[in-house]
Amino acid sequence: MISTDAFASSANDQSTVFVDLIGDLDATLGGLFADTLARLTERGTTSVFLTTKHVSISSNDGLAALDAALGAARARGCSVAIDPGNRRMRSAFASARIPCAGDAFALRPQRARHLMIARHSPPEKLPKSA
């Protein structure tokens, strides 16, 4: 089930948002992140801190969707910093040539909105052998 009710406008919307991606970074999670980021930038978010420390698997489609979403947000004037969080994701971002933040997370404000987007792919069913 995909729910976007968490994005309803409120009087205390922040201009800085932290986004945690959790699970498997496939095309679906990349698309969810892209939609989320588009809505956030439309509503005035100027800074996004993305962390992928809880991502266990990444696919080429997921990385491509994430990179496209980051490019679109940056084109709208939103600054985006990425903390890969683990060695596997650092390697995936490096091979996809997606720049990650070094010390940008040390400068994050104390009060900001925090979103978590999770998606776990269904396990692959192996064909039965005779």
Image: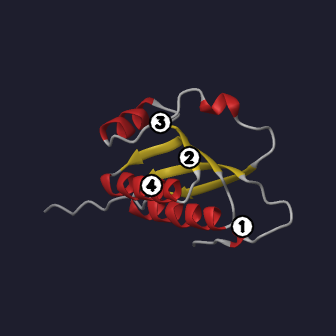
Q: What element carries label 1?
A: helix
Residue 3 seen in render: yes
Q: Do the residues labelled 2 and 3 touch (CB within 8 Å)?
A: no
**In front: 43, or 92?**
43
Percent coordinates x, y for residue 7 in the rendering: 70, 68
Q: Do the residues labelled 4 and 3 touch (CB within 8 Å)?
A: no
Residue type highlighted by circle 4: Gly
- Which of the labelled discs sits on residue 80, or is there none? 2
**Within-10-Å neighbours for mark 1: few <14, some 14–19, many 20+:** few
**Within-10-Å neighbours for mark 3: few <14, some 14–19, many 20+:** some
Q: Which of marks 1 and 4 is in front?
A: 4
Question: Residue under circle 1?
Answer: 6
Residue type highlighted by circle 2: Val
**In front: 23, or 21?**
21
**Which is more N-terminal, label 2 or label 1?**
1
Q: What element carries label 2?
A: strand
Question: Residue under circle 4?
Answer: 71
Q: Nearer the viewer, mark 1 or mark 2?
A: 2
**In front: 128, or 97?**
97
Q: How far apart are marks 4 and 2 (CA)?
A: 9 Å
Q: Is mark 3 on a helix, strand or loop?
A: loop
